[in-house]
């Protein structure tokens, strides 16, 4: 295993007595596309919220030697942990480039934006290329396609040089072509970074997951390769209502 890993151990989150996450452990390494799946309310988003400091969690979430739990949100960001939200959180009124500038912590006047291609800094340039948004840098984020908005969010994390990308349902609402493009994007960025994908889409999971953790009612139901998890009777039972979603189709 090369590079720093994210190791979550016995993560617990309670909301006034309700156990949303009840002792979840998983790890993620650079070079794999790690999936967290599970039915609605399983605790997937809450795990990400706890790792990124948005909600209080107990247990441990370590990036290399550094414990993330108990740190403030901005400190966790500074350690290189980035996340996206279930609903895209880009600035619709601003252009792609302006959004990336903000992610990079830079401010650019709107006049300098007009012919700013040459002035784009290398990290932004790279993030645009990686996400296929190079041709859209002057496009207001609000008129991007749904898929492009998600890619912009990922580009913003790349500009911040996030070492860990926690992506909450990145392909929800995407077309098939956008899904494929996103899967390939995730595989590329996962080569050097830790990528954890929360997803409902079983087909997408099957195509791009290296390892999967299945959550159910705040606990780990099953963990392993796609094949191992799909063959697990407990997983099949939980997905019974959508049994065809777990089998080849
Ligand atoms: N701030 C909160 N206060 C109280 N309960 C919460 C809060 N956030 C989440 N929960 C509860 O915790 C449980 C886990 O929610 P979470 O959003 O993590 O699920 P999820 O797996 O992301 O589901 P989905 O697939 O619907 O996004 C749910 O029962 C939810 O209602
Ligand atoms: Mg969620």
Image (tube, rainbow, N blue to C red):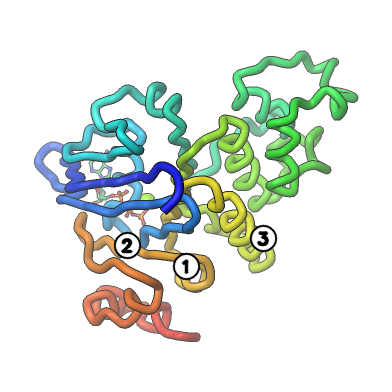
Q: Which residue is mark 3?
A: 181
Residue at the location (20% across, 45% down)? 11
Residue 20 can be seen, yes or no? no
Q: Is residue 145 left or right of residue 134?
A: left
- Report whether the residue tagged 3 is closer than 8 Å to ligand 2: no
Residue 182: quarter of image: bottom right
Say which element carries label 2: strand
- Report whether the residue tagged 1 is closer than 8 Å to ligand 1: no
Does 216 sit above or below residue 59? below
Task: Give the percent coordinates (x, y) of residue 117.
Answer: 85, 29
Query: In the drawing, what numbered circle is on residue 213?
Result: 2
Q: Residues within 10 Å of mark 2 (few under 14, many from 20)?
A: many
Q: Is residue 58 left or right of residue 188?
A: left
Q: Residues within 10 Å of mark 3 (few under 14, many from 20)?
A: some
First in sequence: mark 1 vs mark 2: 1
Residue 194 can be seen, yes or no? yes
Q: Is residue 1 left or right of residue 130?
A: left
Task: Give the percent coordinates (x, y) of residue 14.
Answer: 16, 41
Say which element carries label 1: helix
Q: Residues within 10 Å of mark 1 (few under 14, many from 20)?
A: many
Residue at the location (36% across, 34% down)? 52
Mark 1 to mark 2 CA distance (whole Å): 11 Å
Mark 3 to mark 1 CA distance (whole Å): 14 Å
Task: Give the percent coordinates (x, y) of residue 59.
Answer: 17, 40
Residue at the location (32% across, 59% down)? 40
Residue at the location (75% across, 35% down)? 125
Does 200 sit above or below residue 90? below
First in sequence: mark 3 vs mark 1: 3
Q: Which residue is mark 1?
A: 205
Q: Is residue 142 left or right of residue 47?
A: right
Residue lying furthest left in this view? Answer: 17
């Amino acid at each position: 295993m090369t590079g720093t890993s994210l190791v979550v151990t016995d993560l617990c989150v309670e909301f006034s007595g309700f156990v949303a996450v009840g002792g979840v452990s998983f790890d993620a390494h650079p070079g794999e596309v790690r999936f967290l799946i599970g039915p609605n309310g399983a605790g997937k988003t809450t795990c990400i919220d706890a790792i990124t400091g948005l909600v209080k969690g107990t247990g441990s979430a370590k990036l290399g030697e550094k414990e993330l739990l108990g740190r403030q949100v901005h400190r966790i960001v500074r350690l290189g942990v980035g996340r996206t939200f279930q609903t895209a959180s880009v600035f619709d009124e601003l252009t792609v480039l302006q959004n990336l500038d903000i992610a990079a912590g830079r401010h650019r006047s709107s006049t300098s934006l007009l012919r700013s291609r040459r002035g784009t800094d290398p990290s932004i340039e790279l993030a645009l290329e990686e996400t296929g948004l190079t041709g859209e840098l002057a496009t207001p984020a609000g008129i991007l396609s749904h898929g492009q908005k998600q890619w912009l969010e990922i580009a913003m994390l790349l500009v911040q040089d996030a070492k860990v990308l926690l992506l909450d349902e990145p392909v929800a609402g995407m077309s098939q072509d956008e899904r494929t493009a996103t899967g390939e994007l995730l595989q590329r960025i996962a080569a050097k970074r830790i990528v954890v994908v929360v997803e409902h889409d079983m087909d997408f999971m099957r195509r791009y997951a290296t390892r999967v953790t299945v959550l159910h009612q705040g606990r780990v139901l099953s963990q392993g390769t796609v094949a191992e998890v799909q063959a697990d009777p407990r997983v099949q039972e939980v997905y019974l209502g959508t049994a065809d979603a777990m089998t080849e189709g």
